[in-house]
Every structure is written in structure tokens, then in C-alpha cells.
Image (cartoon, grey):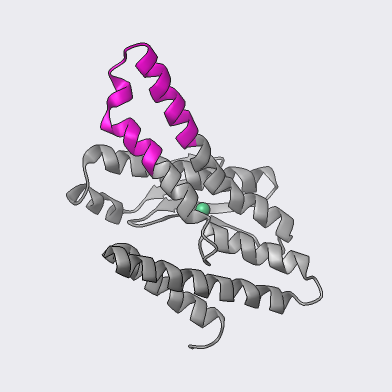
Amino acid sequence: MFTFKGSPVYIKIWFLLLFAWLSPSMVVAIFLSVLVHELAHAFAAVRLGYTVRQIYIDLFYGAAEIDLEHCPEKDSIKIIAAGPISNLLLALVSISFAAFSAQLGGWFAGTAFMAEMIYINFALFAFNLLPIYPMDGGKILRSALMMKMPKNRRLGKRIGDWVSLSTSVALFAVCVYTSSILLGIFSLLFIYFALKELNYIK
Ligand SMILES: [Zn+2]
């Protein structure tokens, strides 16, 4: 699609499937919010001197592939946190813009797009910070625990995996209660990841 600080940025064809399911303004809002999120990870990584191989947006997620080998935890925490923080900022900017536009009697304030931008960015911020690996919150928790337990990093990772497992189970329970099918499938996937990380399944 384009390059960002030397790294190619792609949009996978699957993303366009969302147009069949959601309103066009919602798809554009999701696209912009996920793009800003991934670019924020990439921007933080480049600032700290790491190489970003590529950035892409797929159907249900985006990713910034960053060479984080031998990366000290304090750097990886900054790079990971940059994503959710960018969504919080974008939500606040959208609110200010909508409020400012409303002051001027502008038509833009009340558009579905502004409401969607605010909603999606707060949702991305909150959802990504759930302490579930491999989401940003889970990665931050794992890195933080391993950093705090330099003598027993394995235990640090294990505690993170257990938190991840219990949060995923709780999320699944909420999904069953609210009949959220898509999120329910995701929470099952997260439970599977956590069990795998804990070596309960191969
Ligand atoms: Zn992220």
C-alpha cells in the first residue's frame, strides 16, 4: 500500500470482507484506527533503533512485525504500549474534534463516522490492554513480570500465562452470558493459546 519509515504497509484482501458485514464508514473507521495502532508500534520501535519488517492489516487484526530479538524488556514494553496509547489519543482527538465542530454548528460532529471513531478507539484501547497473551496487555504483563523476576524469568512467564488463562475464561463466560459469538470464538482461541503456553496441550 505504502511504506512507513522504510517498512512496507499492506492491507490484506480479507479486510475488504468487512464491507459485506459492516457499514462503509465503520470499515473506514476500523481501518484508520488499526492502522494508527500498528504505525504507533512501528514508530516506537524505529525510535528505539529496531527494524520493522512489515506492517499489515488482516480481517480481524493488524500486525507490525518487529525484530525484537535480544530486545530488553523495558524497550519491548514501550513498543507494545505505544499501540493502545495511540488509540486512546485518537479517541480523545475525535471527541475534541466532534465537540469543536458542534460548537461551530458543523454537520461533521453528529456523523456516524465520528461516533464510530470514538467508540472503536476506546474499544481497541480497552480490549488490547486485557492481560491476555498475545494481545498487547498480555505481552506487557509477561515482559513486566520477567523484568521484575530476573532470577526466575520462567516463573514470571508462567504467572503471566495463568493470568492470561483466567482472564480468557472470564471473557468466555461474559460472551456466553451476552451471547457474543465472535468474541466467544476469540476467547476460546485465547484459552487454547494459554494452555499451549503452559504446556498443557502440545
Ligand atoms: Zn498492538
Residue 16 covered by magenta stretch:
no
Q: Position of residue 46 (x, y in %)?
A: 64, 45
Q: Is residue 38 left or right of residue 77?
A: left
Q: Is residue 130 left or right of residue 1?
A: right
Q: Residue furthest right?
A: 151
33 up-or-down from 132: above or below: above
* Residue extent of the magenta highlight: 90-119
Asked whether 111 or 175 is in front, the reply is 175
Q: Position of residue 198 (x, y in %)?
A: 56, 82
7 up-or-down from 180: above or below: above
Asked whether 64 or 95 is in front, the reply is 95
Q: Residue furthest left?
A: 20
Q: At 73% from the left edge and 74% from the top edge, which residue is drawn?
A: 153
Asked whether 171 or 23 is in front, the reply is 171
Q: Is residue 131 left or right of residue 78?
A: left
Res 63 visible? no
Q: Residue furthest front?
A: 177
Q: At 75% from the left edge and 65% from the top edge, which residue is drawn?
A: 147
**The N terminus - image quarter:** top left
14 up-or-down from 132: above or below: above
Q: At 53% from the left edge and 41% from the top edge, which residue is drawn?
A: 86
